[in-house]
Amino acid sequence: MDNFSNKQPNGRRPSIDGVSSKPRVRFNQGPSVTPRFGDAPKHSRPENRQGSLNDFSRGEGFHSTKQRQIGPKPDYHDQPLFIERKPARNHSKLLFWKRGGAKKELTKREKIKRGVLVVGASGTLIFGGLLAMGYINLRKVLQGGGGAAALQQNVDPSKLKGEGDGRVNILLLGRGGEGHEGADLTDTIILASIDPIAKEAALVSIPRDLYVPVVDNGSMKINAVFSTGKQLYLNNLSRETNQTYRQSEDAGFKLLEDTLQESLGVPIHYHAMVDFAGFEEAINTVGGVTINAPSAVQESLYINGRNYNLDVQPGTRSMDGFEALAYSRSRYTSARGDFDRSERQRIVLTALKDKIMSAGTFGNPQKMTELVGNFGNHVSTNFSVEDLQRLYQLSQEINSSKISSIGFADPPNSFVTTSNIGGQSVVVPTAGEGNFKDLQSYLRNVLLDSYLKSENASVLVLNGTNVPGLANAKAEELKSFGYRVERVENAPTKGYEKSVVVDMRGGDKKYTRNYLEKRFSVPAVNTLPDNTIQPGSADFVIIIGNDNSSN
């Protein structure tokens, strides 16, 4: 036996005692015959092919293991069998390597399958990379810290702090930012309020010159409160770091939110501040916005380092980021000045909301990544990622026709006017400086608590004390928060030391019950303390006691 244990270089096994191995040649549709002895032609030996039992690439027989027998070239026309020739291979075709180094040509189906896998894998990597980038930028922007119970599904009433907490109120702020004079003055202040049950929203413009009392800091224009809070914090530091800078901004937000909650009488759950550059980039990223201008606006502006002639005529118009910024900042175009500018800002914000919520933006991961990235360097907010996801779901369900636009000087509801204090032009309540009572009542009823509105409970208020007019005063207070007070009367008997809240529906209107319990600091009961009281159709009966006389 020659070379019994080794393959020869050409990949064929050696013969044993002159018996050759059997590479196969395919014989097509011929009669069954005994294979001929001798070598089959070299070009008729397909490599690594499978065949039937009568497929052969070389005749069987005895052959020398050291020197292959060479005979005359056979005449194929004289052979009883037809030997199929394989055409020359096209090496440009897709191949893959088999174990052992042999190449196999893929079928058309296999090529398609592998192509789909390659494209799918590539797409997954690219999309995953974009999502990862977006997630990192989101985490940089969305630090958490706010919290609106109304964002949850099936809210536990105990989680609601009081009337107004059944909405989601977001303070939207705009500042010049680095490189602008008065970089931290919040010249754009808009309260966005969402009703998660009725799927409605409102944009409330707060005049930047509104003159407000600030705790431990006298009174000032509202646009300076954030900057004041921030600077007060920094003044108490020996040195400033990135961490302390962020803390100073948080101090500015807190002072501004506390001031507005006191002046406006509504809770603020979240805030988001964007500078001019971020606002412009965001609009450019989504491909611009389309607005419906109610009136002409023409003004020469110097904005972001360039002179610009703004010329917007009434009607529908598309705007890029720079023009939208100029349109939002233009002031000297009408007698109403800042009030009209506030209206334009609400128009642009609604248009931006529509564009961001469109499938063309949220369905494009690259565009969303760019949008988040642009905001990431120019936005400060206390949203969490989960908060934003829930807000996105709500926003999808709110049509733009369900977004109301509210201004404090918009007829017939004119609650503020211009004035001059200490030589500076300011905006004050029409009821007088510092008197926000009428404005608060109006705003609370326009931004009616979602649960009060959905339950629409009727209330009977009874005076259980000897203090004249106490029940009327409390009834007006309840009305200012959106309660539906049907009647105000004296209780059949006096001398109630503590107020009483009677739930005539046994807990069916659980949110209203929760709010009344917290307002009067007593647990509700289900039965009247005096059977001579005639509740009529009232859902709740409130008997005012002496514990509320001092208020």
Image (cartoon, rainbow, N blue to C red):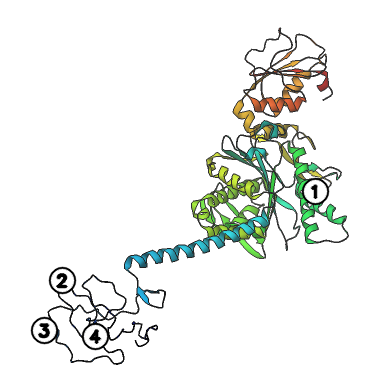
Mark 3 residue type: Asp
Earlier in the chain: of badge 2 and badge 3, it is 2
Kindly report the distance in space between the C-alpha atoms of the residues bearing marks 2 and 3: 17 Å
Earlier in the chain: of badge 3 and badge 1, it is 3
Report the residue marked by disc 1. Answer: 424
Looking at the rendered structure, the number of numbered marks drawn on it comes to 4
Helix, strand, or loop for circle 3?
Answer: helix
Report whether residue 284 is seen: no
| The disc label shown at residue 403, or none | none
Mark 2 residue type: Gln
- Looking at the image, residue 471 sits to the left or right of residue 304; the answer is right
Earlier in the chain: of badge 3 and badge 4, it is 4
In this rendering, the label closer to the viewer, 3 or 1? 3
Earlier in the chain: of badge 1 and badge 2, it is 2
Report the residue marked by disc 2. Answer: 29
Earlier in the chain: of badge 2 and badge 4, it is 2
Residue at the image position 71 percent from the left and 13 percent from the top: 528
Q: Where is residue 268 in the image (x, y as percent from the top left)?
A: 71, 41
Kindly report the distance in space between the C-alpha atoms of the residues bearing marks 2 and 4: 27 Å
Helix, strand, or loop for circle 1?
Answer: strand
Kindly report the distance in space between the C-alpha atoms of the residues bearing marks 3 and 4: 23 Å
| The disc label shown at residue 78, or none | 3
